[in-house]
Amino acid sequence: MNSTFILFCRREWQLLFRNTANLVQPLCFFVIITLLFPFSLPLENELLSRIGGGVIWVSAVLAILMSLDAMFKADYNDGALEQWLMHPRSLPIAMLAKVFIHWVATGLLLTLFSPVLSMAFRIPTDQIWVLFIGLLLGTPSLSLIGAIGAALTVSLHRGGVLLAVIILPLYIPILIFGAGMITQSSLGASIDSQVYALIAILTLAITLTPFAIAGALRITIE
Amino acid sequence: MKFLSTIWQFLNRSFFRLGSPREFYKISNYVTPVFGLLFLVLTLIGSYNALFVAPADYQQGDSYRILFVHVPSAWLSLFIYIVMASAAAIGLIWRMKMAYIVAICSAPIGATFTAIALATGSLWGAPIWGTWWEWDARLTSELILLFIYFGVMALYYAFEERTTAERAMAVLAVVGIVIVPIIHYSVEWWSSLHQGATVFREGGPAMPPSMLKPLLYNALGFTFFYGYILFLRARNMVLDNERKSKWVQELVNKEHNKEAH
């Protein structure tokens, strides 16, 4: 394995547990957004179980979006980012490691927690699995694509809203496939095509976005 | 082979000549009015034929005539995005000032054509489909395109430093290109309310020549309109960006003297 990748994974992993707020906040946000829906809708179990999958997907997208803003901020403020840009180590590989650990702390955690929420929404057991697999395949792409936006807006003081404007349109295709899986399986249809589409997006994202992230960082940090 | 290499060198030189703002400004003095004229002539011929010569549709009656605005706008919304993303890529690769200007000047024009395509589509859908809006693949992906245009513009205007803004915008424009094939194939990949490709398809267009001709005239006319507006905007931006350079100040002085006489 590439030593840069391992090195950066270890660094990010350590930083993650130095400040556990980064670990807890996206998860709390995810759960709270999801809980807003039962409060705002008529309390019918049938309705909740029908929309539950979509609600959990939207909440996951929003939770990841919220966590993106902080992705490069600390490293930008303390100057670590500039050091990496000058360092001869491969920046795309380093960024891939950074996004990977970011995904473990947000996307993977949300995915592992999603069955609990699914049960609260009374989603049938077989569809809980569909939702779980969809989130597992979709959230890494969300982190990778979002990291491009985070890199582009890292030097801006109020990048948060702008980040949402530039990144959410790019999230929509993933949301369509991910949430589409649940609709398909509730109708008893095959979910193969959506799974393949999510895997295709993920493959492209892993291979291409690290270069875009590195390029964006080189542009915005002068 | 020598012949080919001469042509290649000529193309190469003219490509990089266009890359200089001053040369672009000189060339645009002649090109801009030509584009404007071509737009006017082609769109007038196209629209006359569309409104008075083309027959009414046997099912939709006269309401189908909005097609002559809707389809060229929809084509252009994608075409302009491809131009914008290509220009952005050229700018990132060759560090070419003009390429960034072309990219950022294209964004609002593309957004406008996307909005026109959505609005006319919805006006057309109301009587024919019986609905203003349907959450259908073609319509939704076109709406995403509109928001990507907005994102590109918002990112450009968020930076104070122009060179940073140009390059950041260019990265986003290149990344957003993934939406273009999704829109194009949306009618084939998902069963959709929107009809499939009618003009560019295997076995030729499924449309009589009397309808196809005005459509193509309008499409070409709209494209020249895009070129016309793009050149006007790019000229302004060149002058603004280069306002401290000598040639712009000479130009301003010359205009000023002309007015004084």
Image (cartoon, rainbow, N blue to C red):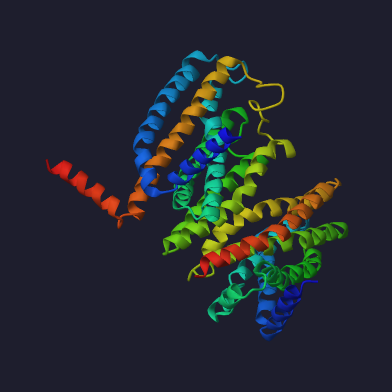
Say whether residue A36 is left or right of residue B48: right
Give the image location of residue A72, x and y in percent: 59, 73
The answer to which quarter of the image holds residue A9 is bottom right
Q: In which quarter of the image is the N terminus of chain A?
A: bottom right
> Does residue B136 appear in this view?
no
Q: Looking at the image, which is closer to me, B209 or B238?
A: B238
Q: Tell me where residue A217 sits by quadrant.
A: bottom right
Point out residue A216 in the picture as x, y percentages from the top left corner: 57, 63
Left or right of residue B3, residue B165 in this image: left
What is the tally of numbered marks visible in this picture?
0
Position of residue B58 relative to residue A36, above or below, is above
Res. B119 in view:
yes
Residue A201, position in %: x, y? 73, 54
Query: Which residue occupies 86% across, 46% down?
Result: A190
Find the residue positioned furthest to the front.
Answer: B2
In the image, taking residue A18 as reference, residue B27 lies left or right, namely left
Which residue is drawn at the image coordinates 61% and 35% (left, top)?
Answer: B1
- In the figure, B54 relative to B223: above or below? above
Instruction: Classify A208 as above or below A74.
Output: above
Viewer-side residue, A52 vs A129: A129
Residue A161 in the image: x percent, y percent? Answer: 52, 63
Q: Quadrant of residue A42?
A: bottom right
